[in-house]
Amino acid sequence: MQTCTIQIHFDAPEIVYYNPWQIGYIGAQKIAFGLQCSECLFIPKEHLKHEIELSEALCNQIFIQENTVIHFIADQDCLYFGPLLGIFTTGFSEKEQKPILNERTIFFEKLLRLQTKLGAVSFLFGPGQICWETGTIQGFFYHDKEGWIQKKIGFPTAIYNRLPNRYIEASPRIKQIKNTLQSHYGIPIFNPNFFDKVSFFQALSRFTETMQYLPKTVIQPNTADIFTFLHTHTAAYIKPIHQSAGIGIVKCFFRKETGLYYAGYYKNDKPVFRAFDNLETLLEETVFKQNTTNHLIQADIGLQRLNGIPFDFRVHTNRDENGDWKVTAFAVKLAAKGAPTTHTKYGGKVQPLELLPFPIKKKRRLREKIYQAVLQMSQIIEKEYSGYIGEIGFDIGIDHKEKVWLLEGNAKPGRAIFQHPLLVESEETSLSSIYLFAYYLLKQSVKQPDLLLENLLNS
């Protein structure tokens, strides 16, 4: 990965100066940044130090700024600067220094702060910022000194999908925009859609190496299925297929000694635990009054506990500059008192594994088992899903026999675990990997354009 700093010269407008002893010989006749491309003449200039000098006219033509620190790839007749990463989202505000509604602005600031360090350029945009006629975007850029600035930029080399919810992602307008960017302009969008629990489960269940991590599950069960499930399992979770963050989850079980059905769920973000005389009433009052009718029921694996409190693990995996999967974040989540899940939204607590009062050998053993499982599952999901998958968030459980179980998989994992001060470094690793994968996609577009196009057409 070679990096240079862009400088401006005031000689002939088509000239590009570079140092062949530090950068290597460039036999190209064009420069490109994003989808913008201009013809030029490369001339050696030996006193430069990892700098490439462009005329102001060339900078304006490809929309690259002076002092930009950027990677480059030379291939045949063109020198490509990049990656230029567009982050696609919605929910823009009219506040100059808080362009995105709610706390998501903080996440985007953290992500964009890393671009110079990683030799990339990135910006936010939504449907309203695209100018199809000119092939440009009025993107939102972030700089430490100036804060948020909106300015014109060409179409990017890759797009990171951070649409905030499934409803927006499913809208016809958003679908059309994503399809046009991919099929007409050839721009890969990674993590193109939210996962749903059924397709995620089915993808992993087709392979022996990953089906071992799946709890017993019935998809779209009827009342008779749920009755049978609760009478053959100690406890179970009923989950909406198209929800995440613990929304709509009900933990339920039947006790023969009392003849009652029990349910733990959330109401107004508070845990509720109730007993019911019959299953029909339980389902009517806890499950089917939700806004979704599609559910699955999954066996409770019996999570390990710490001082009586159940805990599980949040693990992030990302693809790097070579397209390989790596674990980038690993944390323990402990449930709040009386809560049916460990989600932080409902009072769950986050800790690094190192702080758990377990023997070092056990902590090392758990980490190794979970790493192996999530990397296997990441590789399968990458192959089974269309388009490009570059990031996955896993919720992983460990039972009392230390067997690994998949609880959830997320295409746009939340960032709550990084609130713990000992996980700050992991957060930067996770965010940095987004740029590394964008660089991988840039390499794909330059070195293997036919393969890239094939993947886009299949997405």
Image (spheres, rainbow, N blue to C red):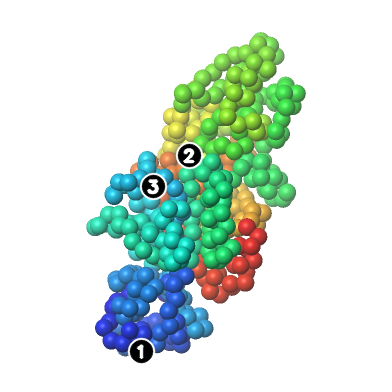
Quadrant in which the N terminus is drawn: bottom left
In this orientation, which residue lies closer to the viewer: 88 or 415? 88
In this orientation, which residue lies closer to the viewer: 393 or 90? 90
**Which residue is label 1 attached to?**
44
Marked residue nearer the N-terminal end (3 or 1): 1
SS of the residue at dot 3?
strand
**Which residue is label 2 attached to?**
332
**Disc number placed over residue 92 in the picture, else none:** 3
Which residue: 44% across, 67% down?
134
Is 379 on the left or on the right of 435, as rendered? right
The answer to whether the residue labelled 3 contacts the one labelled 1, judged by CB atoms less than 8 Å apart, is no
Is 50 on the left or on the right of 261, as rendered? left
Badge 1 density bin: few <14, some 14–19, many ≥20, Cα 10 Å: some
Residue 255 placement (x, y as % from top left): 67, 16
How many callouts does the rendering have?
3
The amino acid type, in three-letter code, at marker 2 is Val
Q: Nearer the viewer, mark 1 or mark 2?
A: 1
The answer to whether the residue labelled 3 contacts the one labelled 2, judged by CB atoms less than 8 Å apart, is no
Which residue: 36% across, 89% down?
43
Dividing the picture into quadrants, the one containing residue 276 is top right
Is 260 above or below relative to 170? above
SS of the residue at dot 2?
strand
Quadrant in which the C terminus is drawn: bottom right
